[in-house]
Image: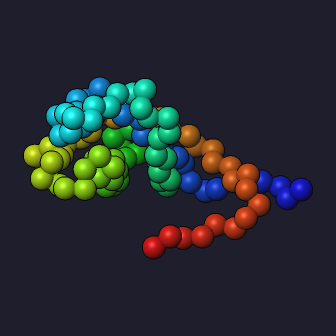
Amino acid sequence: MKEPITINRNAVLIIPKQGYYDWANAVFPEDPIDEEDFTEFNTYLISENSSLEDSKEALDNFWEFIFENELFEISTEDEDWPEELTWELFTQFFKFHFSSIVVDLDINPFYVES
């Protein structure tokens, strides 16, 4: 068996909060969702040098991309999105969990989707 490798990245798991569900349900009231509808969440890899004690600092260069990516999963039309995407709104929409150890247990090599 091949030994697993540790990847030189930290991971952040993004989990929707009530604010996200409220927004999504305002956009599509005919098809309401809640946390019971979400069984998996997106994980993003960030620099292994990220300060995980300070989430704003750790996500400083990425939170806007993450925010847009998560909103895109509900509506691909950015006119449906909140008018202004701020850090404060991001923290109302999402909670996040960090991990400083990322281990690849798969024997297949990585590939990059473009």
Quadrant hosting residue 111: bottom right
Q: Position of residue 36 (x, y in %)?
A: 43, 26
Q: Position of residue 2 (x, y in %)?
A: 85, 59
* On screen, residue 38 above or below 11: above
Instruction: Answer left or right for 61 relative to 3.
Output: left
Q: Is residue 14 at least partly visible in the picture?
A: yes
Instruction: Answer left or right for 83 relative to 41.
Output: left
Q: Camera-side residue: 48 or 22?
A: 22
Count how many numbered circles sit on residues in the image: 0
* On screen, residue 92 above or below 10: above
Q: Is residue 60 at least partly visible in the picture?
A: no
Residue at 19 percent across and 33 percent down: it is 29
The quadrant in which the N terminus is found is bottom right
Q: Which residue lies furthest to the bottom in this view?
A: 114
Residue at 58 percent across and 43 percent down: it is 100
Q: Camera-side residue: 90 or 58?
A: 90
The quadrant in which the C terminus is found is bottom left
* On screen, residue 9 above or below 27: below
Quadrant hosting residue 65: bottom left
Q: Camera-side residue: 23 or 67?
A: 23
Q: Position of residue 20 (x, y in %)?
A: 27, 34
Residue at 63 percent across and 44 percent down: it is 101
Residue at 10 percent across and 46 percent down: it is 83
Instruction: Answer left or right for 106 relative to 34.
Output: right
Q: Camera-side residue: 52 or 69?
A: 69
Q: Where is residue 56 in the image (x, y as percent from the top left)?
A: 33, 40
Q: Residue furthest right?
A: 1
Q: Which color mode does the image show?
A: rainbow
